[in-house]
Structures are given as structure tokens and as C-alpha cells.
Image: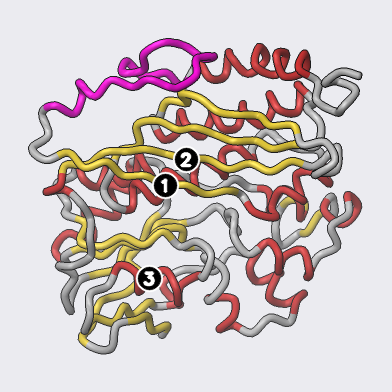
Amino acid sequence: MDYKKAGVDIEAGYRSVELMKKHVKETMRPEVMGGLGGFSGAFSLDAIKNMEHPVLLSGTDGVGTKLKLAMVLDRHDTIGIDCVAMCVNDVACAGGEPLFFLDYIACGRNCPEKIASIVKGVAEGCKMAGAALVGGETAEHPGMMPEDDYDIAGFAVGVVDEKDMITGENIAPGDVLVAIASSGVHSNGFSLVRKVFDMTAESLNTYYDELGQTLGEALLAPTRIYVKAMKSVKDAGVTVKGCSHITGGGFYENIPRMLPEGVNAQVNKGSYQVPAIFRLLQEKGGIAEQMMYNTYNMGIGMLLAVDAADAEKAVKAIEAAGERAWIAGICQAGEKGVTLC
């Protein structure tokens, strides 16, 4: 009896590391010390010495049951982007710059090519965010997970000068809400998606005219990473008073998280066109509109609160970073929460 016969292939683990090294290398920043393969990732803090009061920010998350679609379609090269996005967007939401990232992959059986494809996506997400992929773990769980199944989670660390933190405490009536477009469903609400649509290759490979692509392509579209857009707004001299990353819980849970007491965010549903994937999901599932906005981002991946005088400047800065943005509403005096109008 040996470890391989028990279900853990050490040699496959070594091959996975070799295959992913080239992708990890592309994410390196000057502050990274050492290389891949050490017991910990080392990152120099020299770059933040000029900050008055540096504050470390962290974010951790996974991809949820969106993984089931990747498994059905046997497409694993973008799911890592989702994992990075869910973590670094939360860091950016507080005004921070992501510094480095670590991933954790649990699998029933280590298939080196599949693991390398997943990590390729993680590395791509890190490059989009400007974060270094300094380490990770691939754990084989024979007997606990089916051989072809896997799960992925990540952890991001960022930094912000305390004076630049986005806290929402200064949001006031009259401030304007600026929306940044999502790429679709992102990585939330897939337990409901999987109840509405058949999770078969035939169903997911079905082409829909209203989507302009197959259902699987629309649903697997990776989560947008908003780090560069947030930096562009800051570089334009715009003070972001509040920021909400629209994830699980949709509008009704996430937008109030950035608001102080006595302020109500009024979001104008007519300010933009809800992406076709959400309309199809609602129609096929017979889902009430309130539930859609309480579960999904509905086309808005991030919502900012800025002074009215800075709203147009913020939109232009976001667009200059390659994202779509628009004025989506206003803050008014009232009970803390969100109102769709």
C-alpha cells in the first residue's frame, strides 16, 4: 500500500505545479520576494512606506455553484478570474489596492492539466487586478469528493492610506449614484440559475438570439474586475464617498451596506437596459422582479456614491479604464436602504 493507491497522486501534484509556474510568474510584482514553492509567500512593504497611515485590507471568497457549469462544459480557464474578482473587488470597494493573492483548490483527483487551466484563470485575474499570485494550495480529497469535482477559494490582501478609505460615512442627500456595468450574472445566485435551466451540455450549448451567444457562454462570462476603474476615478481627483460591490443579496442587501443612517439610495431602473441574461432568467423561471433585484446584480457590478459635481467626471474616468458607466440615481434623506424607481 502507498499514498497513490490510497487516492493521492504526489507526482500529479508536482506536474500541476510545473504547469502553473509560467502563469504565476506573469503576475509578479517588484515587492515579491522568493519564488513559487516556498512554505509561505513573502511580500516587501517598502512600497507603502510613504503612506501616512497604511491600513491592510483583506477579502476572501469562492465561486460557489457556478463551478457546476464549468464542470458540465469542461471549461475551467475563466473560473479563476471569478475567484480573484470576488476578493479584489471587495478590497477596491474600500479604496484599496490589491497587493497579493493566494488560492486554494480542493479536488477529488488531481488532473494536472485541469488544475493548470484553473490557475491560469487565477493568474489572469491577478494581472487584471495588479496583484501578485504569491502562493496557493491544491488539495486532493479522495473519498470526500467525486473524482471530477473541485472547489476553489481565494484570499486577497491590499492596502490603503487611512485618509483614502471609502467608508460611506460622509454620503449625504444630493450625492449621485454612479453605476459600473457587470458582465452578467458574475458569481452569485447560481443555485437559482441551476433550478431554472437544465445543467446539461445540450442545454448550455443552446444558442439564444437574445443573448447573441450560447447559454453557457453567457453564464460563464467571468466576473468583471473593477480595480483599474476605481484607481482611474481616484486619479481623476474624484472622491468616492461610498461604494457597493453588488454580489449575493443583490441591490437590497449590498447597497445599504455603504449608506449611513438617514440616507436612502434611489436607483433609477430606467437609467440603463438590464442585460438579456437576466430577462431570460426571469422569464424562464417565473421569478418576481423583487426577487431578481434581491438576488442578482441586474447589470450593475459596482455602485459608487459621489458628489453631484463629480458625477460626470467619475463616469468618464471609469470609461477611460475600459468599463461602461452611467448615472444611475441619487441619494435622498430617508430611511437607510434602497428604493428602486
Looking at the image, residue 142 lies above or below residue 94: above
Q: How far across and down, in percent of the image, does residue 231 sit?
A: 27, 41
Question: Is 32 covered by the magenta stretch?
Answer: yes
The quarter of the displayed image where residue 42 is located: top left
Q: CA distance from mark 1 to mark 3?
A: 18 Å
Q: Amino acid at mark 2?
A: Phe
Sequence-wise, the earlier of marks 3 and 2 is: 2
Segment colored magenta: 27-49
Question: Is 333 covered by the magenta stretch?
Answer: no
- Residue at the outermost left position: 52
Residue shown at the point (33%, 42%) measured from the top left: 320
Tag 3's secondary structure?
A: helix
Q: How far across and down, in percent of the image, does residue 310 sit?
A: 17, 59
- Residue at the outermost bottom position: 334
Residue at the spot of label 3: 255
The quarter of the displayed image where residue 325 is located: bottom left
Q: Are marks 3 and 2 in contact (CB under 8 Å)?
A: no
Is the C terminus in the top left, top right, bottom left or bottom right quadrant?
bottom left
Looking at the image, residue 288 lies above or below residue 136: below
Are there few (<14), some (14-19), or many (20+) residues within 10 Å of tag 2? many
Sequence-wise, the earlier of marks 2 and 1 is: 1
Residue at the spot of label 1: 59
Residue in the foreground of this view, choosing between 113 and 198: 113
